[in-house]
Amino acid sequence: MNPLLKKQIEKYLSSGEEQRLHDFIQAIDNAFSSLDTDLMQMSDALAGESKKLIKANAELKRTLVTKTEEIKTTTSRLEFVVDNISEIIFQASRNGDWLYLNPTWEKVTGFKVKKSLDSNVFEYMHPDDIEFCKVKLKRLLTGKQKLCNEEIRLVTVKGSYVWCKLVAKLSYNKDGKMTGLTGSIKDISKRKLLEEEKNRTEEKYKLIFEKSSVVYLIIEGAKFLECNQACLDLFGVSKRENFVGKYVKNFSPEYQHDGNCSEDKAKEMIQIAKETGSNTFDWVHIKENGEEFPVEVSLNSIPMVEGNLLFVVLHDLSERKRVEHELIRARERAEEATRAKAQFLSTMSHEIRTPMNAVIGVTHLLADDNPREDQLNNINILKLSADNLMSLINDILDFSKIEAGRISLEEIDFNFRNLVNNIAAGFESKSKEKGLDFIVNIDPKIPPYLMGDPTRISQVLNNLCSNALKFTERGFVKIKVSMQPSKGDLVQLQFDISDTGIGIPLEKQEAVFDSFSQADSNTTRLYGGTGLGLTITQKLVKIMHGNISVYSEEDKGTTFCVSLSFPVSLKSKPKVNFTSDHFTEINKIKGLHVLVAEDNPMNVLILKQFLKKWDITCEVAENGKLAYDKVQSGDFDMVLMDLQMPVMDGYNAARNIRSLGEDKFKVMPIIAVTASAFSEIRKKVVDAGMTDFVTKPINPEDLYVKLQKYAS
């Protein structure tokens, strides 16, 4: 018993009562002793659980703080996104009053958000958009549709309107009661501007397509999909449905003029256009009435989502074909007339030549028959007249040959200086008779040997010199030949034939080259001639791809300028003297290092002797593969490449060398050494990337010239 409780009992109770109370309490104490034990155990258990609860509560508080912070962060982020999103985010009541607007509202419309809230949506909408928008929203509110997705115009603070995309749906509270609308509004003004521009462009091109006088057509495969009015007019079609939807074969003859089936050839031409992007060709179509007409077809492939279409442009060739046909007929008539004229002149010249030969022959016989002096004078007059007449006949014959296109040029070596000097010598006696100086001036830089047709060159110079002597009574006649800047491998020469004769009036200078024409009507009477000499000269110069011009002044003289080009003959190239230690321009090739790709030991020996004479070092590769390898490892200035070698031939070796990455291999001279100089071999050599070639058996002069030409 508790001591305090015992003292209180002793204070207020007698000993007998105390005992009875003590017994009572003792009984109670004994009765509840087990309960105290249980309570103590429960108390201990509660204390333990309390600690756990306290710990759990602390953990819950920490979690709550963390989640609260996360919610704040997330909310802040969401608010940032909503505030900075490019679209207007809104909430509106069932009546259409704004309840929430994000800051984008101000960016799009210019109105302040605070002043706009509680105002009605339709106050900011274009009047023409209000009614249909109300209808759409009513369908949304009545449940007939779940989403409103429309394009509208919103007014801005400046009074203008901006196109927007409105997306809205119904919003509900936690009890499922509809509270209003929520959604977004996106500025689509830029897109609308682009669409308007696109529409304007499409309309413009549609108008161009439809109204153009050029025939336009769009096809898919061989089917006509669309066309313009000019196309219908070309085909003579009155109704568009009679053309659109039809096929190429429906408006083409069964066979084209080249004999190909129209349907098959159309497929082939269309396929080419699809593969290459375009195709242009001539075609024959038929009109609705069955009439054939020629066109030029231009197909252009147009990639589309649904497949490739072809844009077709047609050009009616009917008029061009008619003109071409007329031109061909006119040309044929002109050629026929030219041939007839040439044949007539040729026939007459030959017919006249026969009796003229007899006249000249008899004249010579009479002159040799010891005539009297008076007879000799008559014979000389007869001989002079016969010679003049024969000269005229020769001019007419030459002219007829040129007109008929029967003049052909030779390409042979000739000594240029000898040619000019011989021509001058032929006029020496006649110039002395007239008391004239005949001057020859040849540029010393001109190579001694050229290639060309010496006969025709002589004819040109003879005609010009003869004219100069004919029309000059005092002073001189001069042939001057100067070397002009060269054109590639050709030598460009200018011939100036000058005189101090009667000259040509300025207004007559262009006419002197016309057939049967002379500068003055008295010229023929005073000096004779047919007027064909300069015509023949001009035509011969043109045949030789040259030019001729005239510069003259009355009573002071005339100069004819002729410009001609000639290849230099090999006879003018440097000669190699193997018995001498000195060669022309030897320093240019001295010290070269050359790779000789050759499998024949005898050819190798010959080439090495040549190169040694010229102080050129060399290495040998017995086949193309070795040559390819040595070029990469050595430092060579040039390659002499045999074409027929084992392992790898010269063609492939050259191609492989050219394909090497470094620039030096792309420009290194590779000279083919071949036993054949046929044109097909030359083409193969060039196609393989080789620079030039020399032929077998090797001519040392040719080899020397090639080495000198390509030495860097």
Image (cartoon, rainbow, N blue to C red):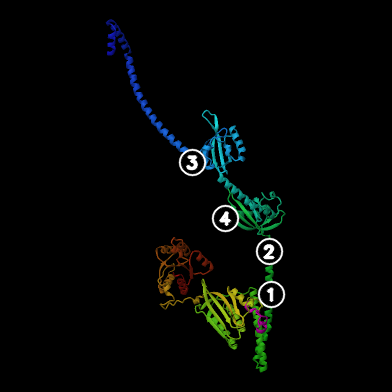
Dot 1, crowdedness within 10 Å: few (<14), some or many (≥20)? some
Residue 601 is inside the magenta segment: no
- Mark 3 Cα-neighbour bin, 10 Å: few <14, some 14–19, many ≥20: few
Nearer to us: label 2 or label 3: 3
Question: Which of the pair 16/205 is nearer the observer?
Answer: 16
Vertical position of residue 323 compared to residue 358: above or below: above
Instruction: Name the mark nearer the viewer: 1 or 3.
Output: 3
Q: In 3D space, how far apart are the residues under numbered discs 4 and 2 (Cα atoms)? A: 32 Å
Disc marking residue 323: 2
- The quarter of the rendered structure image containing the N terminus is top left
Residue on which the image places disc 3 = 84
Amino acid carrying label 4: it is Thr
> What residue is drawn where x is 34% and y is 20%?
43
Residue 632 in which image quadrant: bottom left
* Viewer-nearest residue: 565 or 659: 565
Q: State whether residue 608 is above or below residue 384.
A: above
Residue hosting label 1: 341
Q: Find out whether the residues at labels 2 and 3 contact each other: C-beta distance under 8 Å.
A: no
Which amino acid type corresponds to the residue marked 3 in the rendered image?
Asn
Tag 2 secondary structure: helix
